[in-house]
Image (cartoon, rainbow, N blue to C red):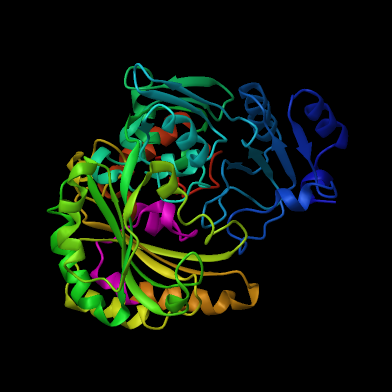
């Protein structure tokens, strides 16, 4: 029996369960251990209760029950958070996976999405209308977590971050009230959720601006790891001068296996994964300077936008061990390039890797205080991830990730993209919000003065320690 169930009157839990349309899953239930699983298998938390919500009324009921009974509350959408912040020990998890819908309006090019959807479901629905919302690189990522933290992806240089395309949201607040937020209603809260994470309430639906994207041209280009310094220096000059329609993230990696050709397997590479969302008749011209760098391997061509979003789903399924570290960077000077060469040459497991996502084009032209996402002036969001299916390798991948990141950090801008880190404490959060942190604390105090929503990259209410 969990601590939560011991502390609460069982009849109170039963009475609560009878009032919601969804279901309550307690320890000992046949579904409990399956419910505890999240994308990162390194996370092993034991909640006292899961509440599987199917509508807004269920969310309101769960929030009120948790608040009235002083329960720790976590909120899970897609369950992709690296640090496992969609779970908590002993308390209540509000699971939004039952709140799913994707409603596309082709006339206004907008799409309304449920709080429990994942991006592959959105891509499928919008693609039929020749539209897309900028969002990530893995289709199984949850809409809620990625959006509230910022949303870097293949379309960022052309159409901005996901938060730059968030028009409206419906939310349940800490007091159980339901609000709609947009530029005209609750504008302070609208500002805060565009990068401020899950600190301010539970978002039950999002409304996004979609854009005309049907077929893109892209794929990976690979060079031997020994060419990291040369290719990274060229990439740094090339990508920020490229048309907004062209995006590409840089990586150090090992080719783990299929779908790549067998002669590449288990070898170390630096690479760039490209996505061009412009006029396809110009694609060959756009890619001429890329191919002039003579990649050892390339797999470039036209594909439906959802296909590039799914490209790595098979290599990175749920249930792997993950350890994350991240930083923002402005320059890729020789010391940085040599560090990438050093650690990229000793990647510990075939799935472990490093990515640099460019922040330029549309994403870089947003004012640094227009949203909480403070690093619009950085050139890259960098992330190092140790990944492996075997729990026995958890220490090995974590150590490599930490050493790689620690060697890079002195050259960083100070903060990190908060969707890319584990649970690293207040100093890291404050550094990542920079000049926007105090404003976020004031909004937090207004809407959540008791820090009810604290299982997240937590922003402390103004006046608290």
Say left or right for 61 vs 290: right
Q: Residue 83 appears at what percent x and percent y?
A: 53, 57
Say left or right for 86 vs 304: right
- Please say if 286 is above or below 26: below
Task: Find the residue positioned furthest to the right.
Answer: 11
Q: Residue 180 appears at what percent x and percent y?
A: 45, 20
Give yes or no for residue 159 being in the magenta stretch.
no
Say left or right for 302 vs 235: right
What residue range appears in magenta?
A: 407-430
Q: Quadrant of residue 165?
A: top left
Q: Residue 248 appears at what percent x and percent y?
A: 28, 56
Name which residue lies at 58% across and 74% down: 394
Q: Nearer the viewer, residue 441 or 331?
A: 331
Q: Nearer the viewer, residue 286 or 393?
A: 286
Q: Quadrant of residue 211?
A: top left
Q: Report if residue 214 is visible in the image.
A: yes
Name which residue lies at 80% across and 51% down: 2
Name which residue lies at 49% across and 74% down: 350
Say left or right for 20 vs 343: right
Q: Residue 258 appears at what percent x and percent y?
A: 51, 67
Q: Report if residue 460 is visible in the image.
A: no
Q: How many marks?
A: 0
Name which residue lies at 43% across and 36% down: 444
Give yes or no for residue 421 being in the magenta stretch.
yes
- Please say if 203 is above or below 416: above
Q: Quadrant of residue 186?
A: top left
């Amino acid at each position: 029996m969990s601590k939560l169930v011991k502390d609460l009157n069982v009849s109170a839990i039963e009475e609560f369960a009878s009032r919601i349309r969804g279901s309550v899953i307690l320890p000992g239930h046949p579904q409990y251990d399956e419910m505890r699983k999240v994308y990162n298998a390194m996370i092993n938390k034991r909640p006292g209760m899961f509440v599987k919500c199917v509508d807004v009324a269920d969310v309101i009921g769960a929030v009120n029950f948790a608040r009235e009974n002083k329960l720790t509350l976590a909120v899970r959408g897609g369950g992709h958070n690296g640090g496992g912040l969609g779970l908590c020990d002993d308390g209540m998890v509000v699971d939004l996976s039952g709140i799913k819908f994707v409603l596309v309006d082709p006339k206004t090019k907008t799409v309304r999405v449920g709080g429990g959807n994942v991006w592959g479901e959105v891509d499928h629905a919008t693609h039929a209308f020749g539209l897309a919302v900028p969002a990530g690189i893995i289709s199984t990522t949850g809409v809620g977590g990625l959006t509230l933290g910022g949303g870097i992806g293949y379309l960022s240089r052309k159409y901005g971050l996901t938060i730059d395309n968030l028009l409206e949201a419906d939310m349940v607040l800490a007091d159980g009230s339901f609000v709609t937020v947009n530029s005209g209603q609750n504008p302070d809260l609208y500002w805060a959720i565009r990068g401020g994470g899950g600190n301010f309430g539970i978002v039950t639906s999002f409304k996004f601006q979609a854009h005309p994207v049907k077929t893109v041209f892209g794929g990976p280009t690979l060079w031997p790891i020994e060419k990291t310094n040369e290719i990274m220096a060229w990439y740094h000059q090339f990508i920020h001068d490229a048309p907004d329609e062209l995006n590409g993230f840089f990586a150090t990696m090992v080719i783990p296996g299929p779908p790549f050709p067998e002669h590449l397997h288990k070898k170390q590479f630096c690479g760039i994964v490209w996505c061009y969302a412009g006029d396809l008749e110009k694609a060959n011209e756009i890619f001429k300077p890329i191919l002039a760098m003579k990649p050892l391997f390339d797999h470039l061509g036209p594909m439906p936008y959802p296909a590039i979003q799914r490209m790595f789903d098979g290599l990175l399924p749920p249930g792997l061990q993950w350890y994350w570290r991240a930083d923002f960077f402005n320059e890729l000077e020789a010391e940085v390039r040599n560090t990438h060469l050093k650690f990229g040459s000793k990647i510990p497991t075939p799935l472990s890797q490093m990515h640099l996502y460019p922040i330029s084009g549309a994403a870089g032209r947003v004012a640094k205080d227009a949203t909480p996402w403070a690093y619009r002036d950085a050139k890259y969001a960098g992330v190092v991830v140790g990944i492996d299916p075997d729990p026995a390798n958890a220490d090995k991948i974590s150590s490599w990730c930490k050493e790689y990141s620690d060697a890079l950090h002195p050259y960083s801008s100070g903060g990190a993209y908060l969707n890319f880190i584990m649970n690293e404490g207040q100093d890291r959060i404050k550094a990542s919000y920079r000049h926007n942190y105090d404003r976020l604390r004031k909004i937090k105090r207004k809407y959540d003065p008791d820090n009810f929503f604290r299982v997240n990259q937590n922003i402390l209410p103004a006046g608290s320690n």
